[in-house]
Image (cartoon, rainbow, N blue to C red):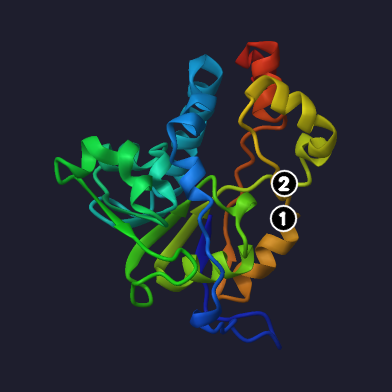
């Protein structure tokens, strides 16, 4: 989790980008689909989501409900419903109207707002939300630094996101890709990040990484292959 600090890195002013030149950030169209959700079906997938939920709620503990939270690319509905139940005021922003489908039970009842926008040029004023969360998007982003910039811009206090680290078994992802595709069928290639480059990107935008919570040493495909979550306990 990152919190807003007072300064950017010495000699590195906060990044400024021409909004008219933003590429299309639409990876959430895939992660919001029923096909993608099927990857988290079954006990292993549910266990992964439960771990993520517990970590996220713990990281947001300093923001008591009804704090406002923006879920960027959250059409996968893996965290918004849990945050709603915890009492937060949730807005989910997606790149396309189709990304709202899995959120229908909550948007229809008025418990969650869904809005369509360019995820690299969000239609919100600076510091509009107490916190911003972003899951399943960064490793597929067309401009990950631009995405982090926007997350930081609209967050008043905190940003929570996930990313695959070079310090885990994901380092061997290229070698595991064929196995992953054979088991999951609908898998995609993704980018890995060194924690230091993530930290630097946030600092350039006035945020300091306060907490890191590694979730899993092994990729989900290996847990599914073994068909038991006990491997990570």
Q: Residues within 10 Å of mark 2 (few under 14, many from 20)?
A: some
Q: Tell me the tag on residue 195.
A: 1
Q: Residues within 10 Å of mark 1 (few under 14, many from 20)?
A: some
Residue 177 falls in which quadrant of the image?
Answer: top right
* Residue 36 in picture, x, y percent from top left: 51, 33
Quadrant that contains the C terminus: top right
- In the displayed structure, 99 sits above or below 157; it is above
* Residue 130 in picture, x, y percent from top left: 34, 63
Please indicate whether residue 47 sits to the left or right of residue 176 in the image: left
Q: Looking at this view, name the residue that lies furthest to the top.
A: 227
- In the displayed structure, 134 sits above or below 228; it is below
Please indicate whether residue 227 sits to the left or right of residue 175 in the image: left
Label 2 belongs to which residue?
165
The foreground one among 61 and 193 is: 193
Q: Residue at x 48, y 49 (%)?
A: 28
Q: Residue at x 82, y 38 (%)?
A: 174
Q: Residue at x 44, y 37 (%)?
A: 33
> What is the CA distance from the residue labelled 2 to the residue labelled 1?
7 Å
The foreground one among 128 and 57 is: 128
Marks 2,1: beta carbons within 8 A:
yes
* Residue 77 in picture, x, y percent from top left: 38, 38
């Amino acid at each position: 989790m990152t919190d807003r600090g007072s300064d950017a890195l010495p000699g590195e002013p906060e990044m400024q980008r021409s909004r008219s030149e933003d590429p299309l950030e639409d990876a959430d169209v895939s992660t919001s689909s029923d096909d993608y959700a099927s990857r988290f079906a079954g006990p292993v997938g549910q266990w992964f989501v439960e771990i993520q939920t517990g970590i996220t709620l713990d990281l947001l503990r300093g923001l008591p409900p009804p704090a406002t939270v923006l879920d960027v690319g959250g059409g996968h509905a893996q965290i918004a419903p849990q945050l709603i139940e915890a009492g937060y005021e949730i807005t989910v922003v997606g790149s396309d109207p189709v990304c709202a489908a899995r959120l229908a039970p909550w948007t229809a009842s008025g418990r969650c707002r869904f809005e369509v926008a360019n995820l690299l040029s969000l239609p919100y004023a600076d510091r509009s939300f107490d916190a911003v969360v972003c899951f399943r998007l960064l490793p597929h982003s067309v401009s990950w630094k631009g995405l982090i910039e926007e997350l930081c811009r609209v967050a008043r206090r905190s940003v929570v996101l996930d990313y695959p680290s070079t310090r885990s078994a994901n380092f061997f992802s290229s070698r595991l890709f064929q196995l992953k595709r054979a088991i999951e069928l609908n898998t995609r290639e993704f980018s890995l990040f060194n924690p230091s480059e993530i930290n630097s990107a946030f600092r350039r935008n006035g945020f300091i990484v306060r907490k890191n919570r590694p979730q899993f040493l092994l990729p989900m495909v290996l847990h599914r292959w073994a068909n038991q979550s006990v491997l990570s306990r």
